Amino acid sequence: WKQLANTLIALNSQESLDLAQYFLAYSQALEDTNISTINDNWLGLARVWMKKVIDRLQPIHAEEYSYYDANSIRVFPDFRLALKVESLEKDMKATQESLKTYLGQKFEETKIYQSSLNALDKVQLYPIVDVVFCGSLDFQPAGQSLPNDDSVQKEYGTKVFLNGEVISLRWKIVLDLAKKVFLKDYRFFEQVDPDYDGMAIMVAGHEYGEPLFTDQAVVEALGAETEALLNEDLATLCITGIMSQRYTNKEISSQAYLNHAIDLLGSYLRYIDTARGVPYLQPYYVGMCLLGLRRMLDCGFVYKDKNDWRIDPSKLDTLYTMSLADLYRQVMIAETKSKTLALNYLAYAIETKEIKEIINLL
């Protein structure tokens, strides 16, 4: 990184000088073995990254805390180099503005919303393609909201990275899985647009929502494992819980209103296929898939007709009402920092008889 920094300095453009400052900070963090200063150096790197690295070329260093590197000691090397592309930025911005408007109307009086709002107000949006990625090769993210550190988020906001190539590839997997479970209603999955429905609405909404309604005090009160199980569901509920308002106010079409639910259902099928039994993916399987699939089953959006699993679009309003109710429950958990409420909420995330039937089909 030091050699690269020297090369960038020699180029003597503003972007190259900013990148040089970043890579020098990165090398300093990697070299530090002093327990009393190492955390400050990694936080310093995050601050340089947020303040200086703002152009089309985006190096992304190891920032995830809860997957391979559960102890946050950076023992798992991870690095990506991404290039910003012009893709659906207008639609993504519309998703962001809707979140600010509707979540503000519902939760502006809560302390936890106010304490995390800066992460949404100061978002740097990057639709990207990965030029280089190494480290967690089996976990190339469709979307990321970074940095993870609460203090840096409050100071500088977040960067939201959305990878349309990954989202499209994952939807191809979903299409194969959907044939195994919902053959008679397969047409619904074919109608989903991975770019608009997947990236601009669902993944963008999830990543915008991920840093909301949480902070270090919530993590400490609930415990890191419990908070991680709640967080993926909460992030998705941020966008799902406002879909009815977006549709009522004509921000999205009736097709997009339906496609969001189908997109979610497809994600649940993929999580069953890939995340079930994988320890570091339990926030997705338990926190997102099981909770989300139970909502769909309980409201009748997904149901069994004799031997066939079917989808009932007439239950959309009920599904979104249930999702909004769970969003309120999640916000109350964060506001009160009640581990009892959190565990009661997560107790709903079980493999019911119906879910086991779907699992067996996959």
Image (cartoon, rainbow, N blue to C red):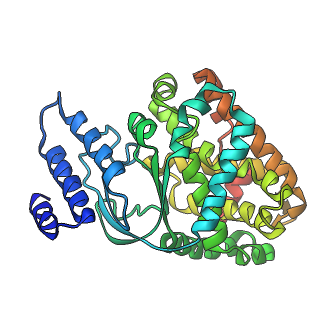
The residue that appears at 20% across and 50% down in the rendered structure is: 26
Give the residue drawn at x 79%, y 65%.
258
Return the x and y of residue 48 as percentages of the image width and height.
29, 47
The front one of 176 and 13 is 13
Residue 225 image position (x, y, % from top left): 47, 34
- Residue 220 in view here: yes
Residue 221 higher or lower than 182, as above or below: above
Query: In terms of image quadrants, where is residue 90?
Result: bottom right
Q: Is residue 38 left or right of residue 144?
A: left
**Measured from the top left, where is residue 184 in percent x and y?**
81, 75
Against 290, residue 328 (above or below) is above
The single residue placed furthest to the right in the displayed view is 314
Q: Residue at x 58, y 35 (%)?
A: 213
Q: Quadrant of the C terminus?
A: bottom right
Measured from the top left, where is residue 233 in percent x and y? 61, 45
Q: Quadrant of the N terminus?
A: bottom left
> How many numbered marks does the figure carry?
0
**Residue at 55% across / 45% down in the picture?**
121
Report the front residue among 356 and 121: 121
Position of residue 53 in the picture relative to residue 30 (left or right): right
Would residue 308 be visible to someone looking at this image? Answer: no
Q: Is residue 319 above or below residue 171?
A: above
